[in-house]
Image (cartoon, helix red, strand yellow):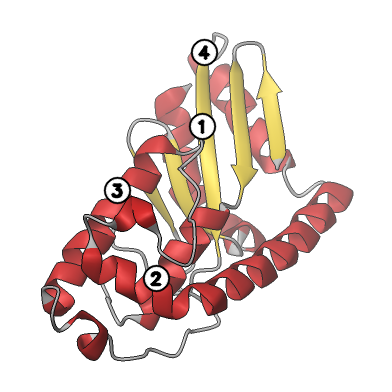
Amino acid sequence: MHHTGGPGWRITMDTCGPMLIALYIRDVAGLAGAGRPALSHVAPQVRPADPSQLTAHVGGTEALRDQWEHWWGRLLAVHPGMEPPLVPPNFGDFAGMPALQRVLQAHYGAALTWSREQSSAYQLLAAERETLGGHKVLADMVQNREMELGRSARDFTLTIVEMPLAEQRAWFIEPDRLIMSQHLLDDHQAFLSYVQPVVELLV
């Protein structure tokens, strides 16, 4: 996790294991466009496995989509707090969402392995940025806005959740969170185009 901050303000950048697992489940189940915001598929792309047999007797893929979107909304609502842990093999917390429960039972092992691989890759990326000063752009954005306004920044916290997403962009979740492709920071102009308006709003 990276922290950038000043008097009364803080910006954090990190990834999120439960969200990684949720995105893997979304993509393996072929639920393109599910969730709000509708994020792009993960990269490298996950090979989909038709969930229709798993979910046939518990509402089918429409029920699965609704249940996944409910889960995703719950993850967004509690982050950066703690979501209740996923407990295999029964996933008792999902008893009220049987289609999602069955898909989790079928794919959790692969999802967990994939999410751990992505988390490890992210930690290497984050360490490289720390060494090269790649996060300096965050403090610069705040300081430039302070100079424009002629005052110090208001108290704020911005949480940036970085994910291995195919589309190089960020999605703003009001009031103070961004979900962002983890390689967006490598493209300075694209990064500024998504993140600077949010920082200016909060400062």
Query: Mark 3 or mark 1, which is nearer to you?
Result: 3
Q: CA distance from mark 1 to mark 2?
A: 31 Å
Q: CA distance from mark 3 to mark 1?
A: 19 Å
- Taking depth in this image into account, of 77 and 40 the one nearest to the observer is 77
Q: Is residue 170 above or below residue 196?
A: below
* Image position, residue 53 (x, y; %): 22, 90
Badge 2 or badge 3: first in the primary sequence: 3
Q: Is residue 59 above or below residue 188?
A: below
Work out whether residue 90 or residue 97 is closer to the camera in this orientation and state it: 90
Q: Which residue was labeled with disc 3? A: 73
Q: Residues within 10 Å of mark 4 (few under 14, many from 20)?
A: few
Number of numbered callouts drawn: 4
Task: Please give the residue where the numbered disc 1 appears in the rendered image.
Answer: 158
- Amino acid identity at mark 3: Gly
As helix, strand or loop, the secondary structure at mark 4 comes to: loop
Which of the two discs, 2 and 4, labels the residue nearer the N terminus? 2
Marks 3 and 4: which is nearer the front? 3
Q: Quadrant of the N terminus?
A: top right
Identify the element where label 1 is drawn. strand
Residue 36 seen in this snapshot:
no
Instruction: Answer left or right for 62 relative to 36.
Output: left
Q: Which mark is residue 104?
A: 2
Of 118 and 128, the residue lying toward us = 118
Q: Using the image, determine if residue 99 lies above or below residue 51.
A: above
Quadrant assignment, res 47: bottom left
Element class at badge 2: helix
Instruction: Give, as a three-letter code, the residue at label 2.
Output: Leu
> Which residue is pictured at 38% across the width and 78% down the height?
27
Residue 169 visible here: yes
